[in-house]
Amino acid sequence: MACEEKVYEGVDAEKMKNIRIELGKLGLQVPETDTGKITSAQIGVEADFTWNPETQIIKVKVLEKPFFLPCAFIYSRLEQTINQDSSG
């Protein structure tokens, strides 16, 4: 079950690094590229993402997820990570 694409602004290199770390802690694999698939075999989530370092925009579209996991929950975890202050 797919979710609508979400677009997030203000994602610089430091935030993208933090996204990879924090989503990794949740069992999601985010490749070290500007585009690709975010995957997790454990929870059955797959998403496409495109990150433009120049414009600092990341686009994410969840392609697969368990029926019991709402799109809003998945995106809220991503938004928490994006909005987190990476300075500690």
Image: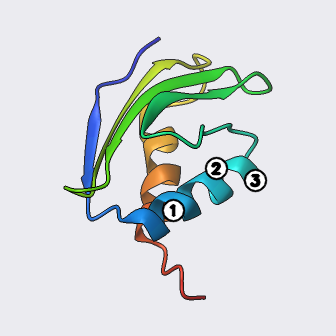
Give the mark, 2 or 1, whose residue is nearer the N terminus: 2
Residue 28 picture location, percent across and down: 68, 38
Residue under the point 48% across and 74% down: 84
Q: Residue furthest top?
A: 1
User: Where does label 3 land, which residue?
Assistant: 25
Q: CA distance from mark 2 to mark 1?
A: 8 Å
Q: Residue furthest right?
A: 42
Please indicate whether residue 73 sits to the left or right of residue 26 in the image: left
Confirm or deny contact between disc 3 and disc 2 (CB under 8 A): yes
| Gap in angstroms between the C-alphas marked 3 and 1 | 11 Å
Q: Which residue is mark 2?
A: 23
Callout 2–callout 1 Cβ contact below 8 Å: yes
Quarter of the rendering occupied by the C terminus: bottom right
Residue 47 is tagged as none
In the rendered image, the vertical position of residue 12 relative to residue 69, given as above or below? below
Residue 41 rendering spot, x and y as whole percentages: 76, 21
Nearest the viewer among 78 and 73 is: 78
Of the numbered discs 3 and 1, the one sitting upstream in the chain is 3
Extreme residue toward the bottom, this view: 88
Task: Identify the disc placed on residue 81.
Answer: 1
Tell me if mark 3 has few (under 14), some (14-19) or many (20+) residues whose alpha carbon lies within 10 angstroms of its own. Answer: few
Mark 1 Cα shell of 10 Å, populated few (<14), some (14-19), many (≥20)? some
